[in-house]
Amino acid sequence: MAGKSWGEPTIGHTTFRLGGNLTEGYFTRRPTRLFPVRGFDSNLLEAPAAAAASAEVFWPLANLQAGYKSLPLFLHRLRLGTFVDAGYASIDGRSDDLLVGAGFELLTSLELGWGSFSTFRIGVAWPLVQADDLDQEGPVIVFQLGRPL
């Protein structure tokens, strides 16, 4: 993901934010001007230009394919995910404000309410690289249930 604004920057309107807020849920949606980098606080850096990328590898643990009694919940697969996220926010086109975070997650795909396919993730992330003026420490808990409606 990447974004660039031209003209005079207006904080919160024509700028992009970089930070740890990855999660979306049934009633929440991540703002389009927020680029997630797990392992950091959300909205950590803000600038008129920003970019972020993520690499994930999923390791299969179990093929559950099971529900629980008559509850409207059906679990599909259980996986371990490892990831590295990187991003930068810049005012003048330089990449001095680089963030890199890494960690692992436990993921399962599930079906709620007889047809609403969702993902449940819980994990831990650590900051690896950060700008000189930042002092972020890990670990940071990553939690997500569902996708926006």
Image (tube, rainbow, N blue to C red):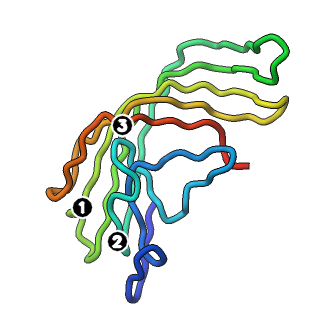
- For disc 1, the marked residue is 97
Type of the residue with mark 2: Ala
Marks 2 and 1 close (CB-CB < 8 Å):
yes
Relative to residue 84, is residue 115 drawn left or right?
right
Indicate the position of residue 16 as horizontal and vertical percent values: 42, 68
What is the C-alpha distance between the residues marked 1 and 3? 20 Å
Choose between 138 and 74: the one closer to the eye: 138
| Outermost residue to the bottom | 7
- For disc 2, the marked residue is 47
Relative to residue 120, is residue 125 drawn left or right?
left
Indicate the position of residue 77 as horizontal and vertical percent values: 63, 20
- Tag shown at residue 140: 3
Q: Bin the neighbour count of mark 1 within 10 Å (Cα to Cα): few under 14, some 14-19, many 20 and up.
A: many
Give the residue displayed 63% in from the left and 44% down from the top.
25
Type of the residue with mark 3: Val
Q: Bin the neighbour count of mark 3 within 10 Å (Cα to Cα): few under 14, some 14-19, many 20 and up.
A: some
Give the residue displayed 27% in from the left and 73% down from the top.
93
Type of the residue with mark 1: Asp
